[in-house]
Image (spheres, grey):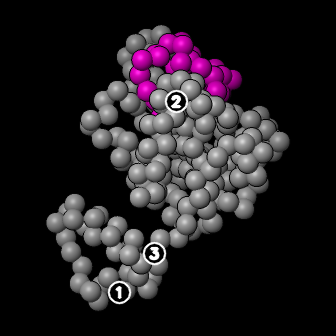
Amino acid sequence: ELLKTIVDRVDEQLESKDKQTTVLAAESGIGKSSLMAATVRDLNKPQRQDMSVFFHFVGCTNLSNYVESISIRFWKCVIESNNSIKIQMKDMTEADFQKEGIQGLFKFLEMNIPNHSFVFLIDAINQLHPSQETPVPHLLTWLPKKAPKNVALVVSTIDTHASCKTIQSMKIDDIPVTKLTNTEIEQGTKAFLDRYDKKVSKEQMQLILEDT
């Protein structure tokens, strides 16, 4: 149900004039990263050929915690995904990508590829590290309150972290993520195993429920 809410919100972002960033906010360990990964999977379905999806999980590598690294990575991924962009941007360097930043990328996509949809997902922005180029006061200045018409942005954070307070001060609505009920865990586990034609016994399901 929550996954459908997020996917629907992304579709609304791309269709609406009021393009608010989608924010998932919850306590640590509740399953935000798993939910973000599931959102990426659902948005990457074959029937969405007019949409390109790019994602970044903060904390997965040493450099993944820096805004500059996210900006450079997204620019490179977008360029590699489109031959016309690759030709157009062939002389750009990492320094250029860092200077343009994430908002510069969004503006570029709006001006140069207006008829294609782009979705960006960034998990755990609460783990972003400050740097010389991006000190603490500027850690979230790249976060747009409203994205361009063909761009949707989804981020996740801990609901008690300063990043969540910053988001609230920008008057960006968040989607609260609550702990799954036993029924939801059972349904999710069965749905996942069904994809691989697998099943668990009642005893195994009970162990799963006790562990969560």
Amino acid type of the residue tagged 3 in the rendering? Thr
Q: Where is residue 171 in the image (x, y as percent from the top left)?
A: 72, 42
> Marks 2/1: CA distance?
44 Å
Tell us which disc is closer to us: 2 or 3.
Answer: 2
Magenta part of the chain: 91-119
Task: Decide: few, some or many residues near mark 2? Use Cα within 10 Å; few <14, some 14-19, many ≥20.
Answer: few
Residue at (32, 82) in percent of width and height: 205
Residue at (34, 74) in percent of width and height: 186
Q: In terms of secondary structure, where does tag 3 sit?
A: loop
Give the main secondary structure, helix, strand or loop, of the magenta stretch. helix
Q: Where is residue 189 in the image (x, y as percent from the top left)?
A: 32, 70
Q: Position of residue 174 (x, y in %)?
A: 62, 50
Q: Give the residue pinned by disc 2.
A: 16
Q: Give the residue pinned by disc 1.
A: 206
Q: Is residue 115 magenta?
A: yes
Task: Decide: few, some or many residues near mark 1? Use Cα within 10 Å; few <14, some 14-19, many ≥20.
Answer: few
Q: Give the residue pinned by disc 3.
A: 181
Of the numbered discs 2 and 3, the one sitting upstream in the chain is: 2
Tell us which disc is closer to us: 3 or 1.
Answer: 3
Amino acid type of the residue tagged 2 in the rendering? Ser
Residue at (35, 46) in percent of width and height: 42
Q: In terms of secondary structure, where does tag 1 sit?
A: helix
Residue at (34, 40) in percent of width and height: 44
Amino acid type of the residue tagged 1 in the rendering? Gln
Q: 4 or 209: which is nearer to us?
A: 4
